[in-house]
């Protein structure tokens, strides 16, 4: 890339409209020829080897048409210019004072020779002459000429340096004349496609370059006033219009210095300019990005701070100012971390959670300041702060790759309150569970404990559980000073309390402060009873509201009741309702049981008292009927009388047996029966029982079989015989003709229980029938069509007597398959050396049936 020099000293009037063009389509030498003709400075366009291609009007007037006419060789016409032309043809700009052409005498002039392509391409140059005739032909220090340390002029070398600077800096070097018209430019030949071609401004006034759409008339007037006052300017920015009429205006930054001659006459300005449009666009985009960034940061709910590597404040957002208003006096760019954090920790407790695995530390004062410094140095983890009002802040920090620190600060008061409330709620639930599952507390004690827990959880000093009872609710349990010294267990009338309002609701009634609540500020509960804060809920049983659970106080509650508190209240009300219903059901059950026990005792006492009254006449009937049947006092005179007497005796004996069974059952239920403990041999006992039922077995055609029956036990022989008789009687009674009944004693081995097994081939029973048969007075075969007589006391009495011996009565049966009954006595009742034999029951010899009395035919007298 090469630097290009364009020059002029201002236009004068002229008529030429022609343009000289080069192979790149540019206008040579940089401006329309009509403009060059108007310039008062002699300008000559030279092509190789040194031939004049064009000379403007001022040049032709200076040397005449022949001196600078087209085709003239400047080497011949102006020999002192030859060396400078060689430099320019080689691409080097040169400015130097030399002797003028011989046609003008020996006076010196200052010339500027700049490279410029010829009309056919290739090398070329433009010569501009500053007419300052007179004086020696010494080198002139200018934009492209300098003296070295030996005093030698190195014009070509310094021109190359200046061009390199222009190319590297992308700046233009310019000059203007006394009328502020541009006369000279030095700039890079290769400019951006959308950039300004500065040489198009040659001969133009600076004021004509301003973009009037972007620059106000007042500013243009102010700038022009500075130029007219010949004041130097630096880094002046203004919008320049496009001279080619295409594209957008460009933003320029320019610096200039006024020039004066030896006599103080103003010669114009010399300076440099740069197209900063792209730079301004980048800065504008950066500003827009910064604005968007700051808008985003300022819209954050969290505070944001950026510290540089020296721990000085770079930027912060509005939330940071809002969260920490005490920083207003010191909050400025460049403030140190120590200045800021000292005010932050003042009056606050610091909780350093550190990094994972490190202990949590809570400190104040100097220790808090040191904790903050250490945390800032780590730039890891979080730091929490709490002030005296209970406001919590959490600080998080992170270090960037360039050693800056990003700090965010958040208000976590709400989260801390939620955590505290959750912890209180969990503690309350645990305490509530402990109360409701405590096995050693009575109902009233549990209710009072629940009230105490609610008072603590809800922050209200009084609690009450009341049942709806007419116009005045009945107190079930109460806690708090409002109930101290209260007389009857009643609350104030319902219309004066919130109870009526609660009972109308399905959910809770929460009043943090009745004094400021328009709904409740005139309610008697506040105006009469002074209950300012209230939290209550209906207690239900099923779908019925039966009472209220309420907490209240005379002072306002500090805040609205939380969801967790409401949920705990609901849980308490559900438990209270269920517990009261369960307690009432248990109380009703206890009352019914007590009534049943009273009735049973009355029955037992009646039967026990009636035993003498019933047995006394029966004994007389049995005795006299037996005397008459045996004719002990003499003949009755008729055989029928003996039969009648035996019938009376048998019926009385049966009735006495029934009475005895009923009395035995009653004694057992009343706990009045006492066993007569003795050593009992099972063999004789079983044989005796078999003999007693053998007569009936023979009548029914039932065979009795006896197996091994040896054994010695400790018990009540009479009651054990009664058990065997009751079971055997049932077996014989319900076994059809041709069946059999087996009896044997079994014991699997030493230490085992002993079983007396009675097995028959009778009609059998289902599981449901067995349950009925074991109930007192239970009748399987019931109704008017009963085929078997009985009271239904045989098996229940047998089981009760067996259980009094510590044993069990076991029954296994299937309809149509017979029945097996085991009278199982515990091993503790078996006497030593008693080992029953194992075998099969053998048939008994059919006992002789007692003579059946024959009824005599009744004869009429």
Image: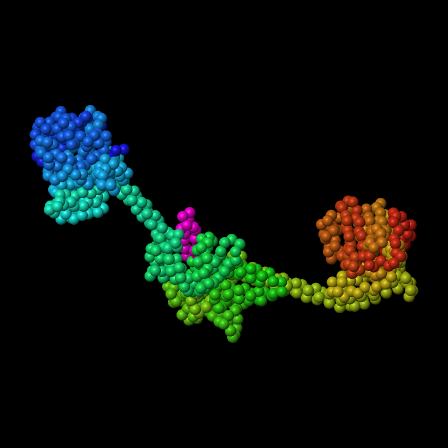
Q: Is residue 416 left or right of residue 138?
A: right
- Farthest residue toward the front? 150
Q: Is residue 401 magenta-colored?
A: yes
Residue 545 in the image: above or below residue 496: above
Count of numbered circles in the view: 0
Which image quarter holds the C terminus?
bottom right
Q: Quadrant of residue 338?
A: bottom left
Image x and y of residue 45, in percent: 16, 29
Asked if residue 534 can be seen in this view, the reply is yes
Image x and y of residue 796, in percent: 76, 57
Name which residue lies at 17% across and 27% down.
Answer: 50
Is 248 or 673 nearer to us in this picture?
248
Question: What's drawn in magenta, residue-wise?
Answer: 394-416
Is 578 or 143 nearer to us in this picture?
143
Name which residue lies at 43% across and 50% down.
Answer: 399
Which image quarter holds the N terminus?
top left
Q: Is residue 36 magenta-colored?
A: no
């Amino acid at each position: 890339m090469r630097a290009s020099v364009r020059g002029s000293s201002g236009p004068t009037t002229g008529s030429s409209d022609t343009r000289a063009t080069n192979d790149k389509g540019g206008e040579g030498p940089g401006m329309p020829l009509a403009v060059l003709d108007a310039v008062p400075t002699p300008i000559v366009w030279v092509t190789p080897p040194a031939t004049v291609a064009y000379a403007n009007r001022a040049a032709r007037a200076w040397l005449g048409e022949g001196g600078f006419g087209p085709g003239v060789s400047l080497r011949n016409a102006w020999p002192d210019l030859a060396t400078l032309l060689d430099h320019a043809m080689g691409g080097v700009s040169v400015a130097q004072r030399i002797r003028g052409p011989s046609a003008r005498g020996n006076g010196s002039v200052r010339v500027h020779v700049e490279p410029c392509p010829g009309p056919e391409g290739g090398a070329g140059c433009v010569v501009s002459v500053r007419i300052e005739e007179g004086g020696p032909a010494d080198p002139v220090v200018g934009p492209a000429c300098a003296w070295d340390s030996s005093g030698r002029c190195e014009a070509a070398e310094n021109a190359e340096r200046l061009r390199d600077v222009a190319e590297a800096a992308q700046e233009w070097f310019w000059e203007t004349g006394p009328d502020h018209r541009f006369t000279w430019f030095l700039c890079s030949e290769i400019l951006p496609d959308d950039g300004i071609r500065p040489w198009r401004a040659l001969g133009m006034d600076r004021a004509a370059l301003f973009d009037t759409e972007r620059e106000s008339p007042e500013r243009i007037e102010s700038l022009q006033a500075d130029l007219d006052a010949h004041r130097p300017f630096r880094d002046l920015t203004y919008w320049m219009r496009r001279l080619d009429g295409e594209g957008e205006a460009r933003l320029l930054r320019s610096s200039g210095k006024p020039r004066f001659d030896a006599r103080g006459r103003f010669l114009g300005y010399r300076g440099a300019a740069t197209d900063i449009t792209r730079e301004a666009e980048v800065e504008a985009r950066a500003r827009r990005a910064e604005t968007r960034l700051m808008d985003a940061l300022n819209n954050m709910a969290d505070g944001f701070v950026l510290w540089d590597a020296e721990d000085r404040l770079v930027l912060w957002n509005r939330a940071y100012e809002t969260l920490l208003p005490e920083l207003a006096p010191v909050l400025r760019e460049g403030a140190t971390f120590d200045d800021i954090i000292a005010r932050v920790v003042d009056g606050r407790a610091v909780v350093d959670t550190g990094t994972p695995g490190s202990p949590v530390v809570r400190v104040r004062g100097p220790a808090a300041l040191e904790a903050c410094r250490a945390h800032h140095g780590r730039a890891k983890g979080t730091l929490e702060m709490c002030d005296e009002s209970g406001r919590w802040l959490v600080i998080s920090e992170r270090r960037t790759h360039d050693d800056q620190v990003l700090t965010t600060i958040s208000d976590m008061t709400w989260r801390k309150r939620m955590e505290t409330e959750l912890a209180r709620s969990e503690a309350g639930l645990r305490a509530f569970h402990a109360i409701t599952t405590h096995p050693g507390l009575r109902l009233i004690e549990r209710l009072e404990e629940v009230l105490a827990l609610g008072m603590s959880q809800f922050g209200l000093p009084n609690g009450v559980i009341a049942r709806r009872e007419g116009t005045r609710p009945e107190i079930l349990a109460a806690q708090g000073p409002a109930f101290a010294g209260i007389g009857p267990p009643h609350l104030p009338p319902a219309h004066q309390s919130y109870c009526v309002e609660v009972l109308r609701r399905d959910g809770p009634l929460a009043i943090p402060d009745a004094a400021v609540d328009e709904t409740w500020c005139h309610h008697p509960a506040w105006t009469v009873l002074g209950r300012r804060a209230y939290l209550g809920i209906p207690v239900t049983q099923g779908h019925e509201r039966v009472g209220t659970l309420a907490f209240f106080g005379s002072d306002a509650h500090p805040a609205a009741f939380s969801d967790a508190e409401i949920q705990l209240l609901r849980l308490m009300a559900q438990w209270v309702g269920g517990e009261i219903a369960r307690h009432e059901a248990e109380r009703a059950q206890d009352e019914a049981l007590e009534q049943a026990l009273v009735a049973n005792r009355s029955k037992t006492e009646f039967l026990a008292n009636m035993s003498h009254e019933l047995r006394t006449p029966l004994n007389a009937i049995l005795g006299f009927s037996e005397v008459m049947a045996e004719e002990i006092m003499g003949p009755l005179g008729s055989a029928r009388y003996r039969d009648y007497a035996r019938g009376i005796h048998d019926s009385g004996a049966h009735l006495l047996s029934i009475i005895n069974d009923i009395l035995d059952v009653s004694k057992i239920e009343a706990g009045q029966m006492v066993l007569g403990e003795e050593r009992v041999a099972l063999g004789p006992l079983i044989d005796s029982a078999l003999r007693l039922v053998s007569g009936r077995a023979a009548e029914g055609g039932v065979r009795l079989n006896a197996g091994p029956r040896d054994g010695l036990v400790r018990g009540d022989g009479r009651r054990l015989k009664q058990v065997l008789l009751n079971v055997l009687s049932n077996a014989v009674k319900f076994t059809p003709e041709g069946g059999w009944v087996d009896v044997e004693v079994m014991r699997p081995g030493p230490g085992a229980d002993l079983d007396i097994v009675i097995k028959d081939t009778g009609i059998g029973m289902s599981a449901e029938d067995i349950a009925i048969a074991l109930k007192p007075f239970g009748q399987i075969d019931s109704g008017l069509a009963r085929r078997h007589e009985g009271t239904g006391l045989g098996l229940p009495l047998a089981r009760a007597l067996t259980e009094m011996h510590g044993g069990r009565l076991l029954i296994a049966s299937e309809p149509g398959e017979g029945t097996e009954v085991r009278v199982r006595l515990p091993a503790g009742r078996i006497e030593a050396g008693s080992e029953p034999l194992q075998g099969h029951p053998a048939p008994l010899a059919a006992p002789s049936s007692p003579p059946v009395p024959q009824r005599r035919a009744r004869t009429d007298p």
